[in-house]
Amino acid sequence: MTVLVTGASGFLGRAVAGALRDAGHDVRTFQRRPSGVDGVSDLLGTVTDPAAVRSAVQGVDAVVHLAAKVSLAGDPADFERVNVTGTQDLLAAARDAGVSRFVFVSSPSVAHAGTAIAGDDAEPASPGHARGEYARTKAAAELLALAADAPGFAVVAVRPHLVWGPGDEQLVGRIVERARRGRLPVLDSGAALIDSCYVDNAASAMVAALDRAEVVHGNVYVVTNGEPRPVGELLARMCVASGVPAPTAHAPSGLARVVGSAVEAVWRVRPGTDEPPMTRFLAEQLSTAHWFDQRRTRRDLAWEPSVSLDEGFRALSGTR
């Protein structure tokens, strides 16, 4: 197939474009800067430009949509314009262009209301309960994507959870930098079980979702390694693999949530130049369990992760 990948200059987007190329597809990418992926055709543009979107989907059989505004803070209008309106315009343009398969890359945060998740499957997206502008707008966009599923236009939503690996600046990079500066406390005892997804596994799951779209269309799947670990262990191993001492300071999660709420209030009035040091959503993510039942995902997508967490940490260490 000829597959358009949006957001392929990002960490996961590059991996997905490469995996689709390796699977034998003709891959085009669409984002604001070159993807850096060999063997694909780059189209430069943004999902906020309807004309560029319409041009990008011409002659395409399938779309894997990763482009999004991802941040813990920011102008709500920016999240709405990129994540919701951009997705809506891309869906309409893809249908009009005769695209037959559409994989919407979502996030488990679209169905997370701040309480522990222990072995759940993919719950319905809820913009009204999602924490933060990113999660809220991704939830709204996922609902739009699933509503567009129709005969001849097979839509699947995939929610990779905490994707990481060598070269990741979004998760690993920020954890390591905060630890290096002594600003990464372990909340409570650090025992909350959290699952994550090594980047190669997340990318192969997207390829599987595309391959199976005409069979599993209309469904939502959470994708993880299926290896829940205590959050304190995950933070420590990411730091050590990156050559930084593991965090040793602890803080109460209740205090972190209060501080996070206060920081969010300040950031709305006087936003900083980087991500806020703490938000309520981040405090919840670092102190509550969130791991998922992977049986339906693996069965329906005919997919299994190929890289274990331990293998992933060794690969991360090897990039030092």
Image (cartoon, rainbow, N blue to C red):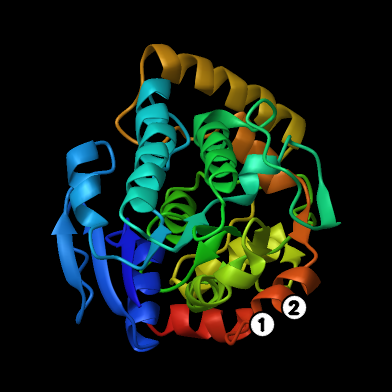
The answer to whether residue 49 is seen in the rendering is no
Where residue 260 is drawn, which disc sits there? none
Report, in whole angstroms, how far the alpha carbon at label 1 lies from the one at label 2: 5 Å
In this picture, residue 295 sits left or right of residue 165: right
- Mark 2 is on which residue type? Arg
Q: Residue at image x 73%, y 35%?
A: 113
Of residues 259 and 167, the one nearer the viewer is: 167
- Which residue is under mark 2? 299
Of residues 188 and 110, the one nearer the viewer is: 110
What secondary structure is marked by label 1?
A: loop
* Residue 1: % across, % down: 35, 78
Is the Cβ of the residue at disc 1 closer than 8 Å to that at disc 2?
A: yes
* Residue 114: % across, % down: 74, 36
In this picture, residue 166 sits left or right of residue 110: left
Quadrant location of residue 166?
Answer: bottom left
Kindly give the residue lying farthest to the front in the view shown: 151
Of residues 139 and 175, the one nearer the viewer is: 139
What secondary structure is marked by label 2?
A: helix
* Residue 314: % across, % down: 51, 85
- Which residue is under mark 1? 302
Of residues 239 and 26, the one nearer the viewer is: 26
Quadrant location of residue 292?
Answer: bottom right
In this picture, residue 282 sits left or right of residue 174: right
The quarter in which the C terminus is drawn is: bottom left
Dot 1 crowding, Cα within 10 Å, few <14, some 14–19, many 20+: few
Q: Residue at image x 27%, y 60%?
A: 9
Q: Residue at image x 71%, y 70%?
A: 297
- Mark 1 is on which residue type? Ala
Q: Residue at image x 41%, y 31%?
A: 79
Quadrant location of residue 176?
Answer: bottom left
